[in-house]
Amino acid sequence: MKLITGAGGLIGSTLKGDIIINGRSDLDLRNTEETFKFFKEKSPDTVIHTAAKVGGLGANMAYMSDFYIDNVLINSNVLEASRRSGVKKLISLLSTCIFPDNVEYPLTEFKVQEGEPHDSYLDYAYAKRVLVVRCRAIFNQHGLRYQCVIPTNVYGPNDNFSLTDGHVLPSLIHKCYLAKRSNKDFVVWGTGKPLREFIYSKDVGRLVDSLLLCEHSFDSLILSNSVEMPISHVAEEISRCMGFKGSIVYDKSKPDGQHRKPTSNARLKKILPNFDFTPFEEGLSETVDWFIRNYESCRK
Ligand code: GDP
């Protein structure tokens, strides 16, 4: 029996499970007692933990304290409930913003705790690092090898397309859509120069499924194609997919955040050497089409 937390979200919606926790209305994972009770009743043997309070640069900076406490509670409860109810295999989803700001690139699995995260994600990063520490502690005390995977910037259908609180790619898709509709400029935050590595949500789902089947006993694993691109390229590609012919304008009064966070996918390549990543243009085009088709009902 496989349980998925956050099944209604960006990554969770790409996964298939027997027991589904879509969101807070199904089960509030911040509530310890209810979470323990639920896991005991359902008794899953496998858990994919994708649930988190998430947001882009804007949301992290605005709600830092909420992001910290909600994610620490969710992560502590899910891991302890899993352990107590006899879960054998657990994979938690993290994010590359957990890495130190001041670190030698590329990022590798060994560097998670080598320094302070970037100021803009202090809350979220530390709350997610809790997962790495808890997994290690559970292994040391109970011999259970619960695992953490760390995808780079994930995008795809079912994301939060909020103009203010979303991650860069969904926010820009929404902004470009509105700019086209009202014949206005397409305004992008910052200089457009920061670099990011993007991974399609369906690739993350396929990777997690493959990892469940393989017997490698890694503790944490970066999920990345190791292809960096500037935000300006992302904005241009969105314009192309959307058929937007107006101007792209960079609002330099808005923050750039971390300049880059390139990753090494050496460990992933060793474990799954034949994995084929979806080309960025293809994943983006599917995501833009999905957004246009679901404009009225999607999270925004
Ligand atoms: P990060 O990759 O974890 O830093 O988070 P984001 O997905 O929010 O990406 C932030 C980067 O995209 C920064 O360099 C921002 O300046 C840039 N960016 C450009 N426009 C936007 C936007 O509309 N929303 C967000 N969140 N970031 C934007």
Image (cartoon, rainbow, N blue to C red):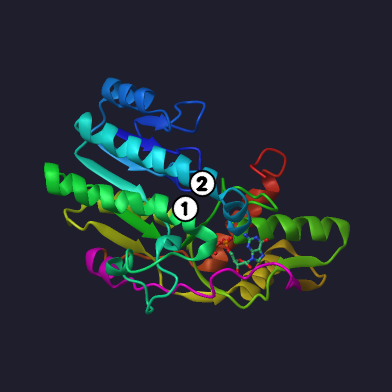
Q: Which residues, given as a range, are shown in magenta?
A: 250-271
Q: Quadrant where the C terminus lies?
A: top right
Task: Name the kind of residue labelled 1 in the image.
Answer: Tyr
Query: Left or right of 99: which side holds 111?
Result: left
**Rendered image: mark on residue 258:** none
Q: Is residue 48 magenta?
A: no
Residue located at (34% from left, 73% from top): 264
Among the two numbered marks 1 and 2 on one chain, the one whose residue lies closer to the N terminus: 2
- Report if the beta carbon of the residue with label 2 is closer than 8 angstroms to ligand 1: no
Provide the secondary structure element on which disc 2 rests: helix
Which residue is labeled 2 in the image?
Answer: 67
Q: Is residue 269 above or below residue 68?
A: below
Q: Residues within 10 Å of mark 2 (few under 14, many from 20)?
A: many
Query: Left or right of 198: which side holds 37?
Result: left
Residue located at (13% from left, 49% from top): 140
Q: Residues within 10 Å of mark 1 (few under 14, many from 20)?
A: many
